Image (cartoon, rainbow, N blue to C red):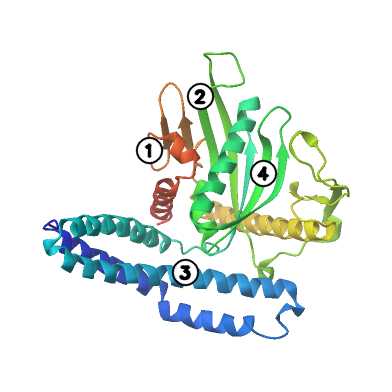
Amino acid sequence: MLPVDFPERLAALRSTFADIRAVTDVESLRRQIAELSEQATAPNLWDDTDKAQQITSALSHRQSELERLERVAARLDDLEVAAELAVDDEEMAREAEQELSALTQTIGDLEVQTLLDGEYDGRPAVVTIRAGAGGVDAADFAEMLLRMYLRWAEQHGYSTSVMDTSYAEEAGIKSATFEVDAPYAFGTLAVEAGTHRLVRMSPFGAAGKRQTSFAAVEVIPLMAETAHVEVPESDIRVDVFRSSGPGGQSVNTTDSAVRLTHLPTGIVVSMQNEKSQIQNRAAAMRVLQSRLLLLQKEQEAATKKELAGSITASWGDQMRSYVLAPYQMVKDLRTEHEVNNPTAVFDGDLDGFIAAGIRWRKRKDQ
């Protein structure tokens, strides 16, 4: 038998979903898909490869968003039918209760997405992880974070591409950069930016001694070609080198990897994912332009705050702690969201932290 409050909870869920559909503007989404589909079928589409990729990527993102909404709508309809059949069926009642719980989680995730209304929130994300203080443990921690984010993306069916990896000598990585190509990837992952701290019994040091290590996570939006900033060639130093794997073992026989250094700001972007030097340089330039545009926006915002006299201190040195010894805990120091299963978190179970972070950011910005 269904719980007495089941109809009320289902009605509340339908109401929340109706609000989400209204905010998303499903009809506008359908129009955009129709327009992009027409552009994608043009016979001369691939005459301009960059533009073709923009169109097909935008089409894929919007189709995914619409399909997700339609799947939830269908599940709500099916649940309503199941609830009627469950009146005299205990097994059906249990299944209906489980589906209601699952839908509550799914619609909660969609509701969080409606908070992503920043200028660049809908863009793909480029994430860079760098080992900080802590020696070998920090390099190992950086690699653990890389796996964590790639697993999170994989669980959601998001496309990822590791663009550059710099391996540490003993274990782990010095840094890694990867792209997440999914709707609202930047808005979703932006709350992961900051300093992460790991406390554990070091597998590299003396037995029985706890080690604290740090890693930094940077998240930037990957800008559309039309949003790039002009970068004079004289402002860039270009270095080419051979792509390499762990331990420096060459995996390429040509100097195809590219490192761009923006001389005025000191920003460095390396790329070795593509097979040719030209492709790596183009990819590196796009990331560099994204970083420069974001830097420009941050400087403008800082100037406005200074003129208004409202500059506030930034968050502390760490935004999240991962504790493996003497107890098990992962805690976000901004939102107070906490779980006692670090293994699950490192395996990609980040949705609770991300949702809490998005809500925290929205409250902070109001």
Q: Amino acid at mark 3?
A: Glu
Of the two numbered discs 4 and 3 on the same chain, state the one appearing first in sequence.
Answer: 3
State the CA–CA distance, disc 3 to disc 2. Answer: 40 Å
Total marks shown come to 4
Residue 314 vertical position relative to residue 106 in the rendered view, above or below? above
Q: Which residue is mark 1?
A: 338
Q: Is residue 51 left or right of residue 302?
A: right
Q: Is residue 293 left or right of residue 317?
A: right
Q: Which residue is mark 4?
A: 176
Q: Which residue is mark 3?
A: 65
Q: Position of residue 78 (x, y in %)?
A: 28, 69
State the CA–CA distance, disc 2 to disc 1. Answer: 17 Å
Of the two numbered discs 2 and 4 on the same chain, state the one appearing first in sequence.
Answer: 4
The reply to whether dot 3 and dot 1 touch (C-beta < 8 Å) is: no
Name the residue rendered at 57%, 37% in the picture: 144
Name the residue rendered at 40%, 57% in the picture: 366
State the CA–CA distance, disc 4 to disc 1. Answer: 27 Å
Secondary structure beneath label 2? strand
Of the two numbered discs 3 and 1 on the same chain, state the one appearing first in sequence.
Answer: 3
State the CA–CA distance, disc 4 to disc 3. Answer: 29 Å
Q: Which residue is mark 2?
A: 200
Q: Amino acid at mark 1?
A: Glu
Secondary structure beneath label 1? strand
State the CA–CA distance, disc 3 to disc 1. Answer: 29 Å
Q: Answer with the quarter of the image where residue 141 lies.
A: top right
